[in-house]
Amino acid sequence: MEHGRSSPESRDSAIRSRLIVSIGLLGFVSGLPNVLLNDTLSAWFSDLGFSPKDIGWLSLITLPYGLKLLWAPLLDRFAAPGFAWLGARRSWIALFSILLAISFALLGWVGPESAAVSVLPAAVIGFAIAALSATLDAAVDAHRTDAASGGEEGPAASAYVLGFRVAFVSIGAAILMLHGRIALLFGPEGDVAARALGWRVAVAAGGAAMLLGVLAAALAPEPARQGRPTTIRQAVVEPLVAFVRAFGPRIAVVLFVALLFRLPDLLGNRMTMPFLRQELGFSVEAIGTIRQFLGFGMTILGAVVGGVLVKRWGLFRALVVFGVLQIASNAGYLLLEAFGRGETVWAGVLPGFGVAPQPLFVPRPSLAGFAGLVIVENLCNGLVSAAFVAYFMTICEPRLAAAQYAILSGLMYLASSLVASTSGLLVEQLGYQGFFLVSIMVGIPPLLALPWAMPRLSQAGSEP
């Protein structure tokens, strides 16, 4: 080899490294709107005193994640206006990253000041953010499926999930930890108006990190444009026909698994903040701190190990093992409910007067129990997310990736939005213990159906 020239192997390695790093960044910008619309908004409203039922109904603003399959095929057909020079895939990523940064600034502007204020303005902006974020997800999913096809699905899925989860435990946790300090800039501790303003500023500042999506779009290699749809009909109809052609009658099982496999995690997340904040009495700052220091490490470990094991074990075995762990991790909330919420003491006894004692609940939230839950939950979520992303990537055709991936992930989020919207009612009817039992049970049927939802040998290189 001549001096100063790199070998083909080193060039290929550099291209692969650039691809994996860019996919990690794209995972981050996909995860950030999710954490701000779900975890952060739930914590914000819980802290201001909104009821679990109200917080549950807010899940409906995330419906665009389930409906994106209606417009995602257009991303396979067109490039984004004004950014076409980046290519068909990356142009949409840059455009929607900028629009989302602006939208989160608007959400901070109109956010509620107390539980007595209407949430309609925030809900309208939140719905618009969900629509933009869902479309961004479709573009990111299509780029990843297209660029990493041909044996790199496992590492690409691992990098994406790592970036996605890092958004949760970095920006998401940082907002929980710092919003109280921001509030002190506007008023004394305990001032409701200052605390609400702290939330609004923190959310707007966190949303500004969406501008990293422009950097990710510039860094990511644009996949070769081969065999993409040339008409709207090809972009809309052919993805469905291709699915039916690949799976035959089993396509119904594939859609069933896509609909429900991740529901235990997605359903449980909606009531996590009201449970920790209102039921167990944890401070928002304590929740953010524990997630930051423990969740970050477990997220990295789960995503990396998940990607490695998908490649080593094969997709089916990884999905089964990680699906069981996903269900089991929700049992941690039952343990925390039973042993980590405080104790009941008897008060009101007046000797000699015969006054009956009255039960009094004293909240003593267990930080050790919550820390253990964060470790297990983040590890299991990282594992199952990596495997399920690899599953979607494997069964989608690269040239139809935006439409097909949107169909699968759209069904997943549609179930989450509709079921989670009733999560507050479930808590009121069943209590938190019954609610988390339901979140465990909904994960069993898709796990049993999984063998019939796997791609054939010619599609994935392995058969269950």
Image (cartoon, helix red, strand yellow):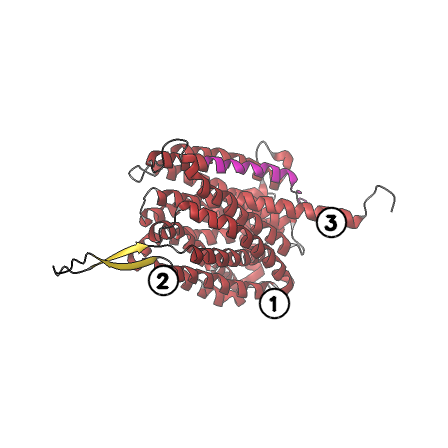
**Residue denoted by label 3:** 13
**Residue denoted by label 1:** 463
Disc ID at residue 338: 2
Name the image quarter holding the C terminus. bottom right
Q: In which quarter of the image is residue 114?
A: top left
Q: How far apart are marks 2 and 1 (CA)?
A: 42 Å
Query: Can residue 208 be spotted in the picture?
Result: yes
Determine if the magenta segment contains residue 76.
no
Q: Distance between the residues labelled 3 and 2?
A: 51 Å
For the residue labelled by badge 2, is the local secondary structure a helix, a strand or a loop?
helix
Q: Earlier in the sequence, mark 3 or mark 1?
A: 3
Q: What residue type is labelled 3?
A: Ser
Q: Residues within 10 Å of mark 2 (few under 14, many from 20)?
A: few
Q: Is residue 313 depicted above or below 50 in this figure?
A: below
Left of 87 or right of it: where is 429? Answer: left
Q: Tell me whether the residue at label 3 lies in contact with that at label 1, contact meaning CB atoms closer than 8 angstroms.
A: no
Q: Earlier in the sequence, mark 2 or mark 1?
A: 2
For the residue labelled by badge 1, is the local secondary structure a helix, a strand or a loop?
loop
Q: What stretch is highlighted in magenta?
A: 204-225
Left of 112 or right of it: where is 81? Answer: right
Left of 251 or right of it: where is 190? Answer: left
Q: Position of residue 408 (x, y in %)?
A: 51, 54
Question: Relative to the observer, which residue lies in front, 257 or 154?
Answer: 154
Q: Tell me whether the residue at label 3 lies in contact with that at label 2, contact meaning CB atoms closer than 8 angstroms.
A: no
Question: Relative to the observer, which residue lies in front, 180 or 212?
Answer: 180
Q: Nearer the viewer, mark 3 or mark 1?
A: 3
Q: How far apart are marks 3 and 1 (CA)?
A: 30 Å
Q: Residue at x 64, y 46 (%)?
A: 21
